[in-house]
Image: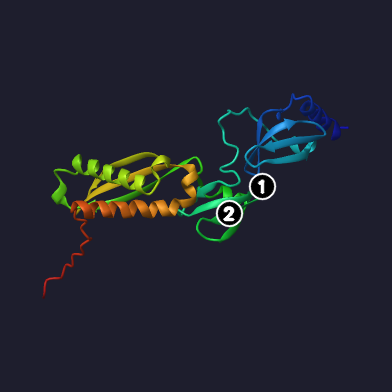
Amino acid sequence: LRQTLPQQWQQSLLMLNMGAVREGERLVIDGVPWRIDSLGVFCRLSNPDLEQVLRLPIENMLPRISRPYNLDEPWFPCKKGDFIRVGDNTVLQVTSLSHEQVAVVRVGTAMATIYPIADFLALAVTNLSKKFSVSATFGLSYDLQAEITNEVPKILRAYLQKRLDEEGYSSKCLGMTCELSLANSSTLDMAVILEFEGEMASIYYRLQRAVQRWCVDCCTENGWDIPYNQIVVHSANPA
């Protein structure tokens, strides 16, 4: 009785929705959050993003504590079919996922990888499926110092917009930034950032290359010099 009565009492409180774990709250198991749908002899938990359901015996819930959650809290970093970018700037598409493992394919290849759930959650994951940005940074000559903060960004912005229209990307472009990023030792560095809708993530690498190409073409068309890095060699004084 000393061993079983306390446990039965705690289980009864849970089934009456009066314990530390309550229906409609959020509970994390092995790093994955779950919504508690019902408590009973067997408890039903679900994750809307994973589209998975767990059925756990009531005794497994005794040492746990749930909490209320906000409606805008994510239930997982991604959903099936989403495009994601991991820490090394690799873009992947999620082909299958569960609370045990996540299967992904690298964009532009047939290379498939399966991550155990703990390894996947340890990655620095950025979800690209809502919106994302591509950027380029390039240096211009100090001959443009008088124009670099006003005229150059205006010309560059107009040129990029023209190329977006020509290649059919303008309707999916959400925003554009062209501005001086850094007055470097030998160059004036320009930063270009284009933001796109998430449905364009499947051609992420193509857009990244296109932005670089457009920036170079704009410099060529306007006669802007892109200095190359110079290596200065210092020789020791002869003895």
Quadrant where the C terminus lies?
bottom left
> In the image, residue 120 lies at what x, y percent?
58, 50
Quadrant where the N terminus lies?
top right
Q: Is residue 237 left or right of residue 202?
A: left
Element at label 2 = strand
Q: Is residue 63 visible?
A: no
- Name the residue beneath numbered marker 1: 98
> In the image, residue 90 lies at what x, y percent?
48, 55
Q: CA distance from mark 2 to mark 1?
A: 12 Å
Q: What amino acid is labelled 2 in the image?
A: Val
Q: Viewer-proximal residue, 61 or 186?
A: 186
> In the image, residue 143 lies at what x, y percent?
13, 50
Q: Is residue 150 left or right of residue 175?
A: left
| Disc 2 to disc 1: CB gap under 8 Å | no
Mark 1 neighbour class, 10 Å CA radius: few under 14, some 14 to 19, many 20 or more = some
**Going 30% across and 50% down the picture, which residue do you hit?**
137
Question: Which picture quadrant has residue 111?
Answer: bottom right
**Going 75% across and 25% down the picture, which residue do you hit?**
17
Q: Name the image colouring.
A: rainbow
Q: Is residue 150 left or right of residue 200?
A: left
Number of marks present in the image shown: 2
Q: Viewer-proximal residue, 55 or 217?
A: 217
Q: Viewer-proximal residue, 10 or 123?
A: 123
Whether 76 is drawn above or below 70: the answer is below
Q: What amino acid is labelled 1 in the image?
A: Ser
Whether 88 is drawn above or below 47: the answer is below
Label drawn at residue 104: 2
Q: Nearer the viewer, mark 2 or mark 1?
A: 2
Label drawn at residue 67: none
Question: Which picture quadrant has residue 69?
Answer: top right
Question: Which picture quadrant has residue 162?
Answer: top left
Earlier-in-chain disc, 2 versus 1: 1
